[in-house]
Image (cartoon, rainbow, N blue to C red):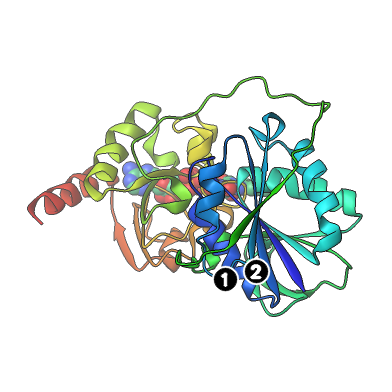
Amino acid sequence: MAVLVIAEHDNTSVKDATNKVVTAAKAMGGDVDVLVAGSNAGAAAAAAAKIDGVRKVLHADGATLAKQMAEPMEALIAPLMSGYDAVLFPATTTGKNAAPRVAAKLDVMQVSGVIGIEGADTFVRPIYAGNAIITVKDSQPKKVLVVQATAFKAAGNSGSASVETTAAPAGPFKSAFVSEEMAKSDRPELTAAKRIVSGGRALGSSEEFHRVLDPLADKLGAAVGASRAAVDAGYAPNDYQVGQTGKVVAPELYVAIGISGAIQHLAGMKDSKVIVAINKDEEAPIFQIADYGLVGDYKTIVPELMDELTKA
Ligand code: FAD
């Protein structure tokens, strides 16, 4: 049994999601290799080699891999799969983009949103927006898994695997990278944040959203998230969205302000360790999963909370 983990990285360092997917891969048994595909990504490959339990790192470097787009990633990964039984992608933007293309090329179905590994072919994943958990047995010859990294503990960084170079695909490909607009923030990245403050439709405008949430997030050293209603209404950018069609998070603290707790929102945050909900409707479903529920107007409660945090 040999498993290939696709690293999430920024060419210089490896993201925590990679260490977590390595833990998932180890639970399948067998050897675990990590693929670092990028451009000038030597530092990331060296960092991946330190992850505990990794046999070797495959490092593919080239201009075609600079943005890790689906086409070159598939052209790289699909041929490598002759030497592997399974490939595991983190459920990140990049991973979710490339995995289906690799699965199609290998003519297998991918298993998405994996939150548990019970062996080499048995995987646990949520269905019906997290309302039920299913255990699936995958008997396909090659397995393509998209792993919900937040469900696994990160492997440590005291390993010393070898790094092997593998050729980057030459291209050209049908799609080309044109440009990107990156949201700049000094706050922690949402999926890796230990604390998250999230706002919903109740905030009413973009100005109010930032007026209320930003100082609280700064005070707590938290990332800012949002419900889909808040994103759709333009109060918060798309990449803030938490939920079934947004990001899945599991911080130590999740503060939901003016969010009702629709099942699609809960699917993205219900595994948070401590959930605090502020809502003026005591019947709001968010209170069913909240550890601390504050019933009232956020306009009163958030300033009180800020005062208490300042005193603390
Ligand atoms: P609302 O449901 O309108 O709730 C607003 C809450 O604010 C209410 O509970 C109200 O009591 C409270 N409130 C109002 N004023 C105040 C005040 N002054 N002080 C305190 N509380 C106040 N949603 C997501 O969030 N993420 C997803 O990924 C997602 N994916 C979806 C996918 C599909 C296929 C579908 C169909 C829906 C999806 N949704 C998702 C939408 C989801 O169903 C809800 O519509 C959405 O989560 C509601 O957002 P909300 O809680 O901010 O708004």
Which residue is tagged 1? 53
**Point 32% across, 48% down: residue:** 222
Please say whether residue 247 is visible from this viewpoint: no
On the question of residue 57 being in view, the answer is yes
Q: Secondary structure at mark 1?
A: loop
Q: Callout 2: 10 Å neighbours few (<14), some, many (20+)?
A: many
Q: Position of residue 180 (x, y in %)?
A: 58, 24
Residue pointed to by mark 2: 25
Q: Nearer the viewer, residue 238 or 137?
A: 137
Where's residue 310, x and y in %? 11, 49
In this rendered view, identify the residue nearer to me: 185 or 283. Answer: 185
Q: Quadrant of the N terminus?
A: bottom right
Image mark for residue 165: none
Rounded to the nearest angstrom, the CA distance separating label 2 from label 1 is 10 Å
Q: Residue at coordinates 28% horizontally, 47% vertically from top-left?
A: 297
Q: Residue at x 44, y 58 (%)?
A: 284
Q: Residue 205 falls in which quadrant of the image?
A: top left
Q: Is residue 298 left or right of residue 287?
A: left
Label whose residue precedes the other's in the sequence (2 or 1): 2
Q: Nearer the viewer, residue 304 or 172?
A: 172
Callout 2 secondary element: helix
Q: Nearer the viewer's eye, disc 2 or disc 1? A: 1
Three-letter amino acid code at the position of disc 2 = Ala
Viewer-proximal residue among 208 and 236 = 236
Q: Is mark 2 within 8 Å of ligand 1?
A: no
